[in-house]
Amino acid sequence: MTRSLILAVAILTLLGCVPTSLQIQHLQLSAGQAPLALGESPVIVLDGIAIPDYLLRDELLYRESEFTVRYDPARRWAEPLDLGIQRVLGRRLESVLDTQRVILFPDASANPADWQLRVTIEEFEATGSIVRIAAEGRWEQASEDRLVRESVVFEDSLTLASNNGDDIAKAMSKLLWKFADELAAGISGIATPPATDEQTDADTDFKNVTETIIETTR
């Protein structure tokens, strides 16, 4: 074997051992082209999103079975998933309820909030050819003599156009749009109490407590 052939074989061997760089696709949830809000009420504080720890990884999660999940190192969220969900829901609620005053926790409102919204995400993942969501939103409105609670339970799924990252992020975004619509419907028609100088703490004994649970499952 000639020296040049030996050298060529050695180079090819070395090249085969060099790891190729991973091409990472960063995904971001989108609020879509929602119309801009013009109103100033109601004032809503959207708390931080409660989400299972296993969904807080940067990598996109795929549900393989009831007991196993897989993380895709080549597809990663461009921001923490809970913050992305909060951003999209806040923007969609602004549009649907026509209010510019949706404040995302931990930002503080200069004026007392008319509503406080707590959202819990139970499932938000891709599995097979679909993406699905299971979530609950709890509205709370406090006045001097009344505490109103509205609970919106939401489950839905969408079929994926393909398994590429863009289609997955788009479908997951659309599920959040539908969830925001249901959340807004949960308080539509409920009057906002007049502002008072002193806001009653939620732990106080109220004369009237109204609680409604709305379930949406598709």
Image (cartoon, rainbow, N blue to C red):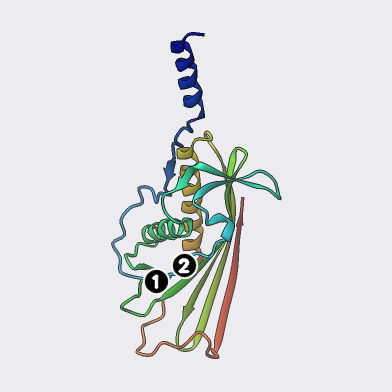
Vertical order, 52 against 59 (above or below)? below
Query: First in sequence: mark 2 or mark 1?
Result: 2
Describe residue 109's horizontal placement relative to residue 12 as left or right: left
Q: Disc 2 and disc 1: Cα gap in Å?
A: 8 Å
Callout 2–callout 1 Cβ contact below 8 Å: yes
Q: Is residue 122 visible?
A: no
* Residue drawn at (47%, 46%) of the image: 76
Residues packed near mark 1 inside 10 Å, few (<14), some (14 to 19) or many (20 plus)? few
Q: Is residue 8 visible?
A: yes
* Residue drawn at (35%, 75%) of the image: 108
- Residue 13 locus on image (x, y percent): 51, 23
- Residue 129 locus on image (x, y percent): 60, 37
Q: Which residue is mark 2?
A: 48
* Residue drawn at (47%, 58%) of the image: 180
Vertical order, 113 against 179 (above or below)? below
Q: Hey, which quadrant is residue 196 in on the image? A: bottom left
Q: Nearer the viewer, residue 212 or 204?
A: 204
Q: Type of residue at label 1?
A: Pro
Q: Nearer the viewer, residue 12 or 155?
A: 12
Vertical order, 205 against 88 (above or below)? below
Q: Nearer the viewer, residue 86 or 177?
A: 86
- Residue 41 locus on image (x, y percent): 34, 70
Q: Secondary structure at mark 1?
A: loop
Number of the label disc, if any, that sits on residue 106: 1
Q: Type of residue at label 2?
A: Gly
